[in-house]
Amino acid sequence: MYQLDATDRRILAALDDDPRMTVMLLAQRTGLARGTIQSRLDRYRTEGLLRLESTRIPPAALGRGLAGQVAAELDQHKLDEAVAAVRRVPEVLECFAPAGITDLLCHVVARDPDDLYRVSEEIRLCPGILRTQTSVFLREVIPYRIRPLLDAADAPDHAIATADARGRSPGSAQRAATRPGATPAPTRRSPRAPGASA
């Protein structure tokens, strides 16, 4: 997949503030050439980098204000068949294949608890699914987001900066003292007892 660089992050952060921004306004906002912006926008489309516009719609606006997850255990010989059937359930927003005993983990929405039961049963009856377990999301505390990743520095540099801000790790002073050309730390002597020879 195409990897975003600093220029891409500037463009996408500006679009996050106003998705309807024109190329000319993006150039003014980011300080980039219009040709650069247009070529990057074209690449996002050809690479399929941007999600569909419909993914921005909150499910509650479509009458599905209740969210939950359905964990499913599968007959492994029917994995593809099960995934194809789950895909046809409109209330399944996304589905993952996690590690562990759960084979599929579906993020679902519904109108109310009774409707959630209907959705979970529809998933359970999909070909290849042996059993399911349903849980309800009581509240969304952090919505899906990407902006913090756009604004963040590169991970290695960020980790080094964080370590420097918190102080050196244990043993770093010793490692520094053993570097070639480093000045060794002074050694503290214990006071001599009276009458002891030098």
Image: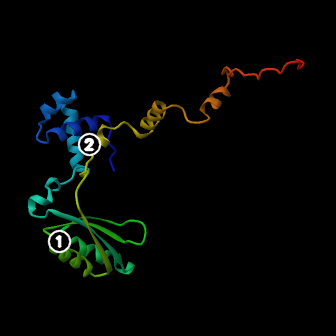
Nearer to me, 49 or 115: 115
Which residue, given by chain and number where applicable, does mark 2 sit on? 147
At label 2, the amino acid type is Arg
Q: Nearer the viewer, residue 113 or 48?
A: 113
From what the image shows, is residue 73 above or below residue 136?
below
What coloring was used for the rendering?
rainbow
Query: Relative to the observer, which residue lies in front, 106 or 117?
Result: 117
**What residue is shown with label 1?**
113
**What residue is rendered at 42% in x and 72% in y?**
101
Query: In 3D space, how far apart are the residues under numbered discs 2 and 1 (Cα atoms)?
Result: 32 Å
Quadrant of the image occupied by residue 26:
top left
Q: Is residue 38 above or below residue 105?
A: above
Question: Would residue 2 be found to the left or right of residue 167 on screen?
Answer: left
Give how far across and how far down residue 171 sits, in percent: 62, 35
Q: Quadrant of residue 158?
A: top left
Point out residue 198 in the picture as x, y percentages from the top left corner. Answer: 88, 17
Does residue 170 lie above or below 112 as drawn?
Answer: above
Name which residue lies at 20% across and 76% down.
117
Name the N-terminal-most of marks 2 and 1. 1
* Dot 1 crowding, Cα within 10 Å, few <14, some 14–19, many 20+: few
Residue at (83, 21) in percent of width and height: 193
Q: Position of residue 173 (x, y in %)?
A: 61, 29
Residue type at numbered disc 1: Pro
Q: Is residue 164 left or right of residue 15?
A: right
Q: Do the CB atoms of the residues marked 2 and 1 lie less than 8 Å apart?
A: no
Q: How many marks?
A: 2
Q: Residue 123 shows which numbered tag?
A: none
